[in-house]
Amino acid sequence: MATTDNSFNGMTERCDECELDTLHEVNVQIRTESLKQENAQFSREPYRVAECQRCGTRTSQRMNNA
């Protein structure tokens, strides 16, 4: 489970690369999933993106899997 720390935009999370609980910068990005231009406006989905501040490994997870 993630916990907050005293930094502004940081979360302490498990990093699989470092094999430690490390500080991560976490944000939400809206990504377009469709490659077809005419459907692009309907295929935007939010993703949670976390980047380890120790090793730089970045992970992303789609937030609504309907």
Image (tube, rainbow, N blue to C red):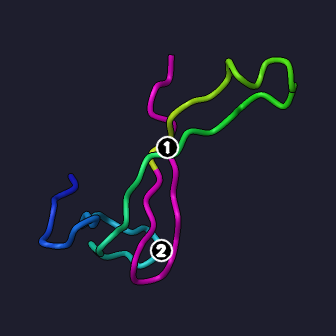
The amino acid type found where label 2 is placed reads Glu
Secondary structure beneath label 2: loop
On screen, residue 3 versus residue 40, left or right, reads left
Q: Quadrant of residue 31?
A: top right
Camera-side residue of 49 and 44? 44
Q: Position of residue 43 (x, y in %)?
A: 67, 23
| Residue at screen point 22% across, 55% down | 2
Position of residue 10 measured from the top left corner of the image (x, y, whole percent): 27, 67
Q: Residue drawn at (16%, 59%), measured in percent from left and top?
A: 3
Q: Nearer the viewer, residue 19 or 63?
A: 63
SS for tag 1?
Answer: strand
Query: Relative to residue 28, is residue 43 depicted above or below?
Result: above
Instruction: Find out whether residue 51 is within the magenta segment.
Output: yes
Residue 12, how many percent across, how many down?
Answer: 24, 67
First in sequence: mark 2 vs mark 1: 2
* Callout 2 crowding tier (Cα within 10 Å): few <14, some 14–19, many ≥20: few
What residue sits right under mark 2 in the picture? 17
Closest to the camera, between mark 2 and mark 1, is: 1
Residue projecting furthest to the left: 6
Q: Is residue 48 magenta?
A: no
Give the answer, above or below, for where 48 lies relative to 3.
Answer: above
Instruction: Inspect the image, locate mark 1, and give the three-letter code of the amino acid beneath it.
Output: Gln
**Residue lying at 16% horizontally and 61% vertically, measured from the top left:** 4
Gap between marks 2 and 1 measured at Cα: 17 Å
**Between residues 62 and 27, which one lies in front from this camera angle?**
27
The residue that disc 1 covers is 61
Q: Nearer the viewer, residue 53 or 31?
A: 31
- In magenta, the rendered stretch is 49-66
Where is residue 62? Give x, y as percent: 51, 36
Number of on-image labels: 2
Crowding at mark 1 (Cα within 10 Å: few <14, some 14-19, many 20+): few
